[in-house]
Image (cartoon, grey):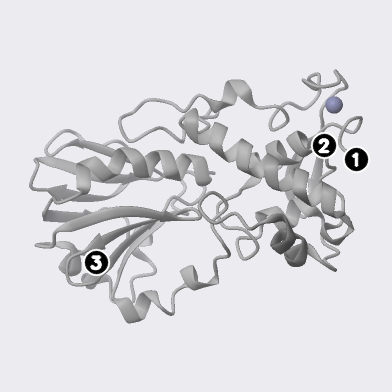
Amino acid sequence: MPELPEVETTRRLLEPELLGRWVTAVDVDHPRAIRYQPQPADFAARLIGRRLGHVERRGKYLMTALDGGMTWVVHLGMSGRMAVRPIGEARQIHCRAAVGLDSGREVRLIDPRTFGHTVVFLPDELAVSSLTDLGPDAHLELPRSRALSAALHGRTAPIKALLLDQRVLAGVGNIYADEALHRARLSPHRAGGSLDAEEVGRLRRAIKETLRAGIAAGGTSLEDMAYLLPDGRSGDYRMRLRAYGREGEPCRRCAAAIRRDIIRGRSSFWCPDCQR
Ligand SMILES: [Zn+2]
């Protein structure tokens, strides 16, 4: 699933294509792609003829400002990615929506499993949307250790599950949660509230370093190549993964075998020897 580094990488490559461009055409090829648009016809009607502003990111959401105060939102879901290609070029299989620009290029949402979505919100709709449930962005607004301790205080849920909770921290998903916990030498099974101040500080630094490294590598393209950069390149962080997807392989720190447990329904990869 695309997480913060993948969405941030996408944002950085999309913005130069979008900023200042006018929308000339909109095609929706799968109704599920716009399932959160209260009136489906609004999606195209609100985009066509509008000028695109800056592309921002909050957690795993991409948000592009439109003139007139509206916001074009994209969430890549489990397997979505964005591509920018010339208008008229054959669309990729699983292209669910395409937005044509006056540059002669077109922004496409490609999403095999259709868990992703896109929607155009008026300001008052955005203000009551699910985006308001997001906690601080894990890259741009990572809380100081004291605030993170307060957020984890008394929580009995496993720290792994709390890291996936977008209300606690927005943007971290299964891959980078496992990577950050490995870097912090913390077991994913630990209750969130059991971490002492020193451990929370370690976790905070690990989240920061992991996300920065993920962004620097262009994100993680797994073997399925579901996630690719908008220009079609793959993200290189897979080679640098320490825990995620490495069941049975030696820990890069202590050489013990990486183990896979299911925590709250999600695969969790960790080293039982050096993560406590
Ligand atoms: Zn280890």
Distance from disc 3 to disc 2, alpha carbons, whole Å, reads 46 Å
Amino acid under label 3? Answer: Phe
Question: In which quadrant will I find the N terminus?
Answer: top right
Query: Ligand 1 closer than 8 Å to the CB at disc 1?
Result: no
Expressed as whole percent of the image width and height from the top left, the position of residue 262 reads 80, 46
**Mark with earlier residue (3, 2):** 3
Residue linked to disc 1: 276
Q: Earlier in the sequence, mark 3 or mark 1?
A: 3
> From the viewer's perspective, is the residue at label 3 or at label 1 nearer?
1
Tag 2 secondary structure: loop
Left or right of residue 204: residue 32: left
- In the rendered image, which residue does mark 3 sit on? 43
Q: Quadrant of ligand 1?
A: top right
Q: Secondary structure at mark 3?
A: helix
| Mark nearer the viewer, 3 or 2 | 2
Kind of residue indicated by mark 1: Arg
Contact, CB < 8 Å: mark 1 with mark 2?
Answer: yes
Q: Residue at x 22, y 56 (%)?
A: 53
* First along the sequence among labels 1 and 2: 2
Question: Which residue matches tag 2?
Answer: 185
- Residue 214 appears in which quarter of the rendering? top right
Whether the residue under disc 2 has CB within 8 Å of ligand 1:
no
Q: Could you tell me residue 171's position as x and y percent? A: 55, 52
Q: Looking at the image, can residue 133 be seen? A: yes
Q: Secondary structure at mark 1?
A: loop
Quadrant of the rendered image containing residue 52: bottom left
Mark 3–mark 2 contact, CB under 8 Å?
no
